[in-house]
Amino acid sequence: MSTKLWAIGMIFFSTLLTSTAQLFYKFGSAKLGFDIVSIITNVELIMGLLLYAVGGTMMILSFRGGEVSVLYPIFATSYIWVSFLSIYFLSESMSFFRWVGVLVIMLGIVFIGLGSNKLDKVGGKIAN
């Protein structure tokens, strides 16, 4: 099965949703109390949950259009998005090793993408 372009777009968009959800979790955690009223009235926490639900649903639907071994590494870009979003919205700093980690994730995604175009083991034909 070859991975369709719409599935790649959908999984990419789901990474943006889930990364944004993590920011909402962070904002919601500042106001979080451990009583039921505080939890159900925490708008940021609820927004994070909704974004995660939509992102997760989109991820599941995108798996219908492609290979998990191609799509899930794209989902791993969530770690990259969260790093950039936390710098911008939370004024967090990135150390040298965090930047190295982002680079390693990016290289891993590139290598997996390149590897998906190599020889198909079934019959030795080149996969497209």
Image (cartoon, grey):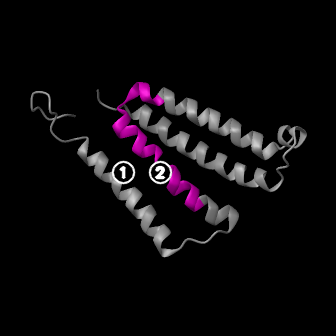
| Mark drawn on residue 77 | 2
In the rendered image, the quadrant that contains the C terminus is top left
- At mark 2, the secondary structure is loop
Q: Nearer the viewer, residue 107 or 42?
A: 42
| Residue 49 place in picture, x, y as percent | 70, 38
| Mark drawn on residue 34 | none
Residue holding disc 1: 109
Q: Residue at x 26, y 41 (%)?
A: 116
Cα distance, mark 1 to mark 2? 8 Å
Residue farthest toward the front in the current orientation of the protein: 34
| Numbered range of the magenta stretch | 62-84
Q: Residue at x 24, y 45 (%)?
A: 115
Q: Nearer the viewer, residue 78 or 35?
A: 35
Does the magenta portion include 80? yes
10 Å neighbourhood of mark 2: few (<14), some, or many (≥20)? some
Does the magenta portion include 106? no
Q: Residue at x 46, y 38 (%)?
A: 9
Among the 4 quarters of the image, the one containing residue 55 = top right
Disc 2 marks a residue whose amino acid type is Thr
